[in-house]
Amino acid sequence: MQGLEVAQIFLFFSFVYKDTYYPCALVQWFLVIGDEPDDETGYWMVGPNVCQNGRLYLAIVHLNSIYCTAQLNPAY
């Protein structure tokens, strides 16, 4: 995936600190499954990244760090 990470955005928000505006997003990180895209679909397979206590791994990121959007399709 050429060094890119996969995340799902839960919330957009912003704040001002010392007269600087910060547009941000609360994201859930995903881990890539395997070393190449799926043979049948051509999509990369990902799964939710969880902490050691089983909770979702969440982070706050600046909107400038979001490269592009992608469609996440569930596997049934």
Image (cartoon, rainbow, N blue to C red):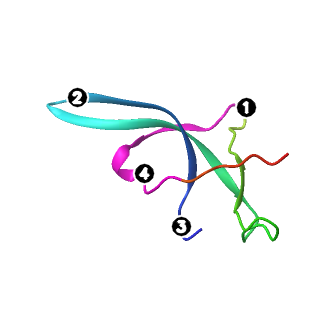
> Dividing the image into 4 quarters, which one contains the N terminus?
bottom right
Among the two numbered marks 1 and 2 on one chain, the one whose residue lies closer to the N terminus: 2
The alpha-carbon separation of the residues under discs 1 and 4 comes to 27 Å
Figure check: 4 above or below 65:
below
Residue 76 at x, y = what percent? 85, 45
Figure check: 56 above or below 45:
above
Instruction: Say what secondary structure mark 1 lies in.
Output: loop
Residue 34 at x, y = what percent? 76, 65
Tell me the residue that label 4 is attached to. Answer: 66
Contact between marks 3 and 4 (CB within 8 A): the answer is no
Instruction: Say what secondary structure mark 3 lies in.
Output: loop
Tell me the residue that label 3 is attached to. Answer: 3
Contact between marks 4 and 2 (CB within 8 A): the answer is no
Mark 1 or 2: the one toward you: 2
Among the two numbered marks 1 and 3 on one chain, the one whose residue lies closer to the N terminus: 3
Residue 21 lies in magenta, yes or no? no
Tell me the residue that label 2 is attached to. Answer: 16
User: Residue flagged by tag 3: what amino acid is it?
Assistant: Gly
Residue 56 lies in magenta, yes or no? yes
The alpha-carbon separation of the residues under discs 1 and 2 comes to 32 Å
Among the two numbered marks 3 and 4 on one chain, the one whose residue lies closer to the N terminus: 3
Disc 2 crowd, CA 10 A, few/some/many (<14, 14-19, 20+)? few
Mark 1 or 4: the one toward you: 4
Looking at the image, the residue that sits furthest to the right is 76
Q: Which residues are magenta?
A: 55-69
Instruction: Say what secondary structure mark 2 lies in.
Output: strand
Which residue appears at 43% of the width and 37% of the height?
A: 25
Tell me the residue that label 1 is attached to. Answer: 53
Residue 11's label in the rendered image is none
Left of 16 or right of it: where is 74? right
